[in-house]
Image: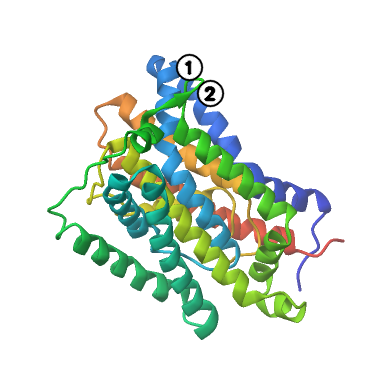
Amino acid sequence: MSVPLPAGPSRLAGAVQRQGALAVLVTVVVVSLATFPGFRSADNAGTILIAAAPPMLIALGMTFVIITGGIDLSVGSLYVLGGVVAAWASQYGLLAALVAPLLLCGAIGVLNGVLIARTGMAPFIVTLAALLGARGLMRSISDQGSTTYLVRSDAFHELGTGALFGVGYQVWLAAGLVGAGIVVLNRTRFGHAVNAIGGSEDAAALMGLPVRRIKIGVYLLSGLLAGLAGAINAAKLGSGVTVLGSGMELDAIAAVVIGGTLLTGGSGSIAGTVAGVLLLGVIQNLINQVGDVNSNWQQVISGGFLAAVVVAQTYVVRVRRAPSP
């Protein structure tokens, strides 16, 4: 028999889930501003935002996937595949450099979604296979990683290195897509269906929602955004680097969960994901500011945050589901 809890703790638990990452981010930034002089510069802020743009796109797609109760382990491989394909296609111009990785990575995302939605296969297994397949395809395109394709389009390279009002183009792109994602998740039938499926897939089906199409759609979105992230990173680096992407799927999952999205699905926010990505980016920047700390500590700290957040989420869910008096 559960003991009824007052409405106050339930509301507080909901606020912690929604705004916890933002509160931690603000605290870390304030402490960093007071402690590290190098952290205060505008150039450093720009560095953080530019570094966060590709992970932000990947985490944006991952947010939709996780809210449905799924997972996408293929995004790291799609990220590096998208970068290699974009660099190769840049010889045909800006449009080709953007469209080619979107088509290829989007197709892999659709394949993931079809296998998961139509056959009932576990997302973990399907996207793990896609991770290996996309990585193998990238190695085949790049001659086992021995060929590095250089960006041949000046306009495409400008997309990764140029700026508007002192802010990099890729940051504006990420911000625009994040804004669109917030609108889609909170203001459209597709977004409401994503939340409903994550809450209860059976109930969503009884409501007449197109569960299979929605699930295919979120994996398509995840693939597209991972490919786009790889493309803009290639534009910034000026080449399709083949050794990137390892572990990016785990970083994306960590950012999404730290941002308050439940791994069990049904609840989450893109604003929280943004805070989670920026928090991990600030931590990495602080490690660089200290200088004598091994960068691997970022993974240790990220893992610690993730473990703490999962434990906190478990408590929050229990509090929110407790019956009111």
Residue 323, picture quadrant: bottom right
Does 165 sit above or below residue 225? above
Taking the spot 84% from the left edge, 61% from the top edge, the residue there is 324
Does 40 sit above or below residue 253? above
**Furthest-front residue in view?**
92
Taking the spot 65% from the left edge, 56% from the top edge, the residue there is 316
Q: Is residue 257 left or right of residue 6?
A: left
Taking the spot 47% from the left edge, 57% from the top edge, the residue there is 224
How far from the left and from the top, in percent, is residue 109? 45, 66
The quadrant of the rendering that contains the C terminus is: bottom right
Does dot 2 land on a helix, a strand or a loop? helix
How far from the left and from the top, in percent, is residue 237? 28, 37
Circles 1 and 2: CB atoms closer than 8 Å: yes
Which numbered marker is on residue 30? 2
Query: Count of labels shown?
Result: 2
Q: Residues within 10 Å of mark 2 (few under 14, many from 20)?
A: few
